[in-house]
Image: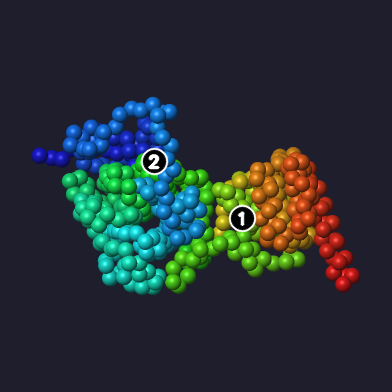
Amino acid sequence: MKQKTVYICSECGYNSPKWLGKCPTCSNWNTFNEEPEIQSSRYDIITDKNSNIKQHPRKLYDISEENETRISSKMHELDRVLGGGIVKGSLILVGGDPGIGKSTLLLQISDKIANDNNVLYVSGEESLQQIKIRATRLGANGSGLYILPETDLDCILTAASESKPTVMIIDSIQTIFKSDIPSAPGSVTQVREVTHYLMRFAKENNITVFIVGHVTKDGNIAGPRMLEHMVDCVLYFEGERTQSYRILRTVKNRFGSTNEIGVFEMKDNGLAEVKNPSQMLLEGRPENVSGSTVVCTLEGTRPILAEVQALCSPTGFGNPRRMATGIDFSRAVLLTAILEKQLGYPMQNHDVYINVVGGIKIIETATDLAVIVAIASNIKNFVIDSKTIILGEVGLTSEVRSIGYCEQRINEAAKMGFEYCIVPSNNLQSIKQRDDIKLLPVKNVSEAIRYLKKIEDKRNKDIQNQ
């Protein structure tokens, strides 16, 4: 008898008896894949008569509040991203580009945790010998670390039930399959069903499960979008393969804040934590050059200093070119238009190139003033003092608006040895003047530029008087 098939949306998991160009649920185009139809339901966790789990409705005020149990990964940067440590019984998804270091990071975590707990590392892509070679290079020799090269989910869960690990790592979810599901490993049905079983296993046995997910060319986790909704935490490992620094970013966390980041450096013996990202991003910064300034951006609760560079050159074409790396392109075009319209800079005759050094991406508007001043500095060829940091959001009329968490940003700048800080005047009303850094309030972009020129003139006079 011919196997019945259905069409499943890879984004939301919607089932359709026939192929559709546009999903009626998530409105995405060309996302339906043909999969074998599963006759029996496997989502009987609560209704299973043989199960020991019995759930009944309870009143909210009768439920006792208990703190979630966490274990330390022995890596401060990872614990920060997870909100203070690994929550027992949680399901964590780790995604990233091929070769970025996902397996390296998880093997290092396994080794550190395995000194005090049992860890089961399941690999569907490498043999025992290949994992041993990588472990030797990383110096991993945890006494409680067990390796299992397996792709059959039933065998994996049986081995985990026998060894009872504290943490189990699945590398990767696209290679694991359930034998009674008639579809290939990595298909929408397999990924969804396997993740469901792993989630059930983690909750019932209070075991933390890390799963590695491949990403598409767009940078999203491969497979159904509902995979990210099923797990408790989603981590993305970012960075350029040609650079040594990596950023671990959380975009979903049921047990902590989102948008936290951890910074690592890829070395010969694995990933090393970067305790002070600001110092790392400012290393080698040129001094006494135009078009270079320092911004302070917030990643979660962590303030990070980064250098923004701007280059303006006369255009050789009819339409001037705009390029931005590390900041939103539309925002860069908007700031360039403000310079031209409100301050009279000849931007229509110049190409503008903006770059955030170090591969970091800035998505907040609190760095607007620094970016617009960097452009003005390069086109007018005046130098921004290297000990000055600039904070503020810029409106369309060139006014400088207040920003959030201003005091935390100023504290980070003072810690890094900056002497001047240009801040929105509205923010200064709630911040006292300090002895370690001088605060200069501004209301618009023109005031900020005048302050910068005065600071540079004072610096030049001090040099001449020495």
Circle 1 residues within 10 Å: few <14, some 14–19, many ≥20: some
Quadrant (top left/top right/bottom left/bottom right) for the C terminus: bottom right
Q: Is residue 328 in sight in this rendering?
A: no
Residue situated furthest left in the rendering: 1
Q: Secondary structure at mark 2?
A: helix
Measuring 39% from the left and 41% from the top, which residue is drawn there? 229
Q: Nearer the viewer, residue 22 or 240?
A: 240
Quadrant (top left/top right/bottom left/bottom right) for the N terminus: top left
Tell me the CA gap for discs 2 and 1: 29 Å
Measuring 35% from the left and 70% from the top, which residue is drawn there? 141
Measuring 25% from the left and 62% from the top, which residue is drawn there? 149
Figure disc tally: 2
Q: Position of residue 88 (x, y in %)?
A: 37, 49
**Residue type, mark 1 in image:** Ile
**Residue type, mark 2 in image:** His
Residue behind mark 2: 229
Q: Nearer the viewer, residue 238 or 207?
A: 207
Residue behind mark 1: 304
Q: Nearer the viewer, residue 434 or 285?
A: 434
